[in-house]
Image: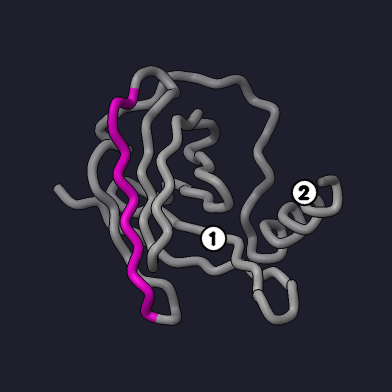
Amino acid sequence: MADLMSILSANYKAVGLSVPSKTPYVAVDPTLYEGSWSGKYANNKSFNVTVSNVDGFRAKVHYQSDGTSKYQDVLIKDSAFRIGDTKFSLVQKGTALIANVVTDPATGSTYLDKAYATQKT
């Protein structure tokens, strides 16, 4: 497990994403996060993220992409949260960076697939 965490941490640093800070959790503005977010990865695969019930720094999230569907309660910290192996980072109002760790089934190597998502109003 420690090896996996170091790989993920190194991948996030390699693409300019920060490792979460040690700042305390604080309440966020629900309007910045709630709603449907969508985008496409470089390989043209679409994804959707639905954020609901934002209360303080907690939210419910549903992530869908290419046959993958994940539901999770998340904690929002430093304008970001994780759902499984996917990280959602709010870049500016209405725009988020989605970074998804992908494992190549043939080689077992991992890479970070990232794309921007826009919030539907």
Question: Which quadrant would residue 111 be assigned to in this image?
Answer: bottom right
What secondary structure is the stretch in magenta mostly built from? strand
Q: Is residue 88 magenta?
A: no
The residue under label 2 is 5
Q: CA distance from mark 2 to mark 1?
A: 14 Å
Label at residue 100: 1
The image position of residue 78, as x and y in percent, is 54, 35
Question: Which quadrant would residue 7 be assigned to in this image?
Answer: bottom right
Seen in the picture, residue 45 relative to 11 is either above or below; the reply is below
Task: Tell me which amino acid carries mark 2.
Answer: Met
Residue at 71 percent of width and 62 percent of height: 11
Crowding at dot 2, Cα within 10 Å, few <14 / some 14-19 / many 20+, comes out as: few
- Check disc 1 and report its element: helix, strand or loop: strand
The number of discs equals 2
* Residue lying farthest to the left in this orientation: 121
Residue at 28 percent of width and 52 percent of height: 37
Camera-side residue: 49 or 67?
67
Colour treatment of the image:
one colour
* Residue lying farthest to the right in this orientation: 3
Q: Is residue 88 left or right of residue 5?
A: left
What are the residue bounds of the magenta stretch? 44-54
Seen in the picture, residue 47 relative to 121 is either above or below; the reply is below
